[in-house]
Image (cartoon, grey):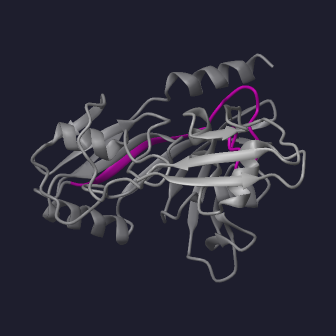
Amino acid sequence: MNKKLELIVIRSGTRLDSYVAQECPELSRSYVQRLISDGYITVNGRAAKGSLKLKIGDRVTAIIPPPAPPKPLPEEIPLTIVYEDSDLLVVDKPAGLAVHPAPGHPSHTLVNAILAHCPDLAISGSVRPGIVHRLDKNTSGLMVVAKNDAAHNNLSNQLKVRSMLKRYVVLVHGYLSPERGIIEAPIGRDPHNRKRMAVVSGGREARTQYRVIRYLDNYTLLEVTLETGRTHQIRVHFSSIGFPVVGDEVYGKRPPILNRQFVHACCLGFKLPSSGEWVEFSSKLPADLEEALERISLL
């Protein structure tokens, strides 16, 4: 059943999306924006844009759909499959596709696509069936997905002992020097904003290796290797040293050249659960990131 909220504005000048997110902290701002675009949030009975500046006395009505079902459902969503066997598949995830259902995107995720592609997926008791590791919604690139519990346990253990190779191409603002380095700083919830991560005392250990590929005007293109896999690790670490990822509006700023963060999972390596053979897979930069580099080169 839908939940209905009625809010009366008592101060003017606040954007509609910001106002609803502030008044309903259980809803993320991105989810609020989707509700607005889908017509679930109105102002004085009329549809409105998220950027609408509210006035005192405005009546904001929000219809909150019920939460996602406990088990995701199959959806026919195109997948780019790089490798597949009886235990796993390696997919090249596009930017804009969430990995698994969550509040704000209960469907149309990688998990839904995998369930359609592998109807006999043998993973027990999980709302994230087969998922071994994650990529942010707006990060593109390679992921490995398990088809059965034994493969999932094997791959998860490789991830735990840090024997799995995860390499990324990342573009950051500024001229990063030296050309090789390691960022080692603990990551946890930002104490001032629980929706963000931050370098904090007492956070979880996090290590990020980088190598400069080339310099472009006032940007640096990097090859980044993760030794740990903390939430938003690449974005948090480079922002913490003053070189935010290009296109990252959470930990940096979004320039006109790109409408998502410049992070691409370009290389993935691990041992096949069935044989122990080491395999590596690679993925080229998608078109939007190549175009961003070309535009920077012309600046």
Residue 261 visible: no
Locate residue 122, reporting x and y percent: 12, 56
Of all residues, the one furthest to the bottom in this rendering is 202
Magenta span includes 66: no
Badge count: 0
Of all residues, the one furthest to the top in this rendering is 298
> If the image is split into quadrants, where does the C terminus sit?
top right
Locate residue 93, reporting x and y percent: 39, 37
Between 6 and 72, the residue placed more toward the observer is 6
Give the side of residue 173 with respect to residue 103, left or right: right
Between 250 and 48, the residue placed more toward the observer is 48
Between 100 and 132, the residue placed more toward the observer is 100
Residue at x 69%, y 75% (from the top left corner): 200
Locate residue 243, reporting x and y percent: 76, 50
Residue at x 76%, y 32% (from the top left corner): 255
| Vertical relation: 132 (above or below) 265 | below
Q: Residue 69 sits in which quadrant?
A: bottom left
Give the side of residue 69 with respect to residue 15, left or right: left
Magenta stretch in the rendered image: 244-271
Predominant secondary structure in magenta?
Answer: loop
Locate residue 121, reporting x and y percent: 14, 50
Give the side of residue 8 with respect to residue 72, left or right: right
Residue at x 43%, y 54% (from the top left corner): 102
| Vertical relation: 191 (above or below) 195 | below
Magenta span includes 246: yes
Residue 186 visible: yes
